[in-house]
Amino acid sequence: MVNSGQRPVVLVTNKETQEKGINKLKLKADVIFPKSHPATREEVLELSGQVDGIMWVGHMPLNGEVLDRGGSRLKAISTMSAGMDYVDVEEFRKRKFPLGYTPIVLNDAVADSAIGLMIAAGRRYHEGRLAIDQSQWTGGPQWLLGQDIKGSTVGIIGLGGIGQTIAKRLKGFDIGQLLYTGRRPKPEAEALGAKLVPQDELLQESDYVFITVPLTNETRHMINESTLAKMKPTAVLVNVARGDIVDQRALVAALKNGTIFAAGLDVVSPEPLPADDELLRLPNAVVIPHLGSATVQTRNNMAEIAALNVLAGIAGTPICDVTVCQGTSRADILRTIAGAEGILWLTGDRLDAEALDAAGQQLKVVSTMTSGMDYVDAGEFTKRGIALGHTPKVVNDPVADIAIGLMLAAARRFHEGRLKIATGEWEMRPQWMLGQDVPGSTVGIVGFGGIGQTILKRLKGFDIGRCLYTGRSKKPEADLAGASYVDLATLLRESDFVFIACPLTGETARMFNRETLALMKRSSVLINVARGGIVNQPALVDALREGTIFAAGLDVMTPEPLDTNDPLLSLPNCVVVPHLGTATQQSLLGMFAITANNVLSVLAGGPLVAPYQMG
């Protein structure tokens, strides 16, 4: 294999690797695959000496033999996994060879699988299906009774990213208590309501035990005959980490003799598991074939990050060594970012000269995980030549959905109605609690960017009369969308519904004040999904109290969190939600992927995926 010109060559060890990752590689490299599928080890080893980088997809041992066969040409390898038990990490360290992996991005998908296995095992899904298949559906009040989650004690062995995400998923299940064990206390545990205990206590007390630790010499066969014997006979074991953390023969015996109630396993030993393995004959073992990260978005994100890791290593820039801030205070953040070359800024804390000074002169790139950038000193980035990214567009749909929901809730007096129910004031009169109609109305959008345009798309089915918009300049998209450009005063005087969807800047701060609110119709509804500082909040409170406007729906306010004694919360005609605009699973994953790719791309010598453009 001869290198084609100046472009490096990258081997991807599995032909079925996600296109998004392959396409990322092809921007800067020629990509080759083994001819066989699945690839043989000998073929992978042979090709290793003919390439500059490898995306190692699968759990084939990755060790010194690969590095030896790669020789001097091979410059970087990245796995497409979070677990690294099949990698001789010490050999890579010894040789100072660039090695990447894909942590964090799969936390949600694996946690979802874990909760699914918890329920399936605890409620006897597999055993129930066997009964159906064997015509043994007997029914009756005592038939196939499972274990309750509500009020239970849950134990998590390893409260890392996946363990913490499982704990978050359990928030809605009304569990009794959450225990965890690990090498050291976790600062995040307090917010999750988790208590650190010795492993023996966790096993003895827990109704559900999740395994989320990495496989190491220390954790191999951690769950064995002795530790299983400490568990309750009603306990359910869930393993989404690695099969060899559990002594599988001991687990089979424990399930057979009732030492524990059931098990839910995404990982086993070996993988693939032989079809005649004894584990598969047990009615109280729910077994799935290592599907933890098997969602389209998660695998796409893993492939993209692995590709960027390889390109970074080939370019001679560092493959990401990920450090997660273990606290939430500004002091914690500034201490953690010291020495970083790239930062994923996942907080609304000020991103300014102080933060950049704390990071140091080696800092190359920062990406926020927001669309709005009012908390960022973008000028400081320009002055220092540091790349600055953010996450626009991906938030458009969820924020627009929140905006429409707030419009309807405020116009139709949802909050006021709920208060009436709670105070026993539910009246049965034709004129009671009349709200505002959307069909035929005039809608005004302040800021016709991506979010504003998506709001108008959502309104297509509402038969509105017309749409007005205002901003710094006319938008070419407006003509196609049927929106008319007007000045702010005209928009306020004529609109029945006013959406705020512009960024917070020096120009827009307190744009909505006593004077501008006075221009609005008394029947109008104000919706703010941008930033709280765009509205003079005391003036809004007065306008709502005095009937200057009909109602308001707010996803954003000042300050955040809002004090529970704030007068805004005493108003029946104000619907307030706690900045939930981007709070959906898909949006969060999409934002994280863009944030990570912004940083990784720059570290690999490429451009930002989503650069912030100063207005």
Image: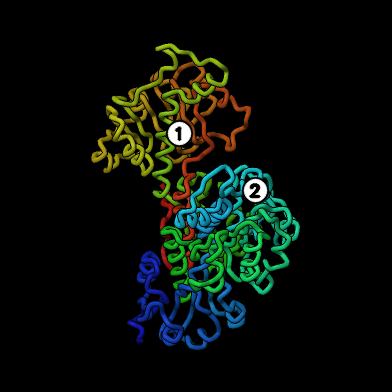
Of the 4 image quadrants, the one containing the N terminus is bottom left
Residue tagged by mark 2? 192
| Amino acid beneath label 2 | Leu
Where residue 228 sits, quadrant-wise, is bottom right
Give the secondary structure at mark 1.
strand
Q: Tell me the residue at 36%/30% (across/down).
A: 488
Looking at the image, can residue 159 be seen? yes
Looking at the image, can residue 382 be seen? no
Q: How crowded is mark 2: few (under 14 residues within 10 Å), some or many (20 or more)?
A: some
Q: Tell me the residue at 49%/21% (across/down).
A: 417
Residue tagged by mark 1? 528
| Residue 306: x %, y % from top left | 46, 69
Q: Nearer the viewer, residue 398 or 3?
A: 398
Q: Earlier in the sequence, mark 2 or mark 1?
A: 2
Q: Tell me the residue at 44%/63% (across/down).
A: 299
| Residue 476: x %, y % from top left | 26, 43
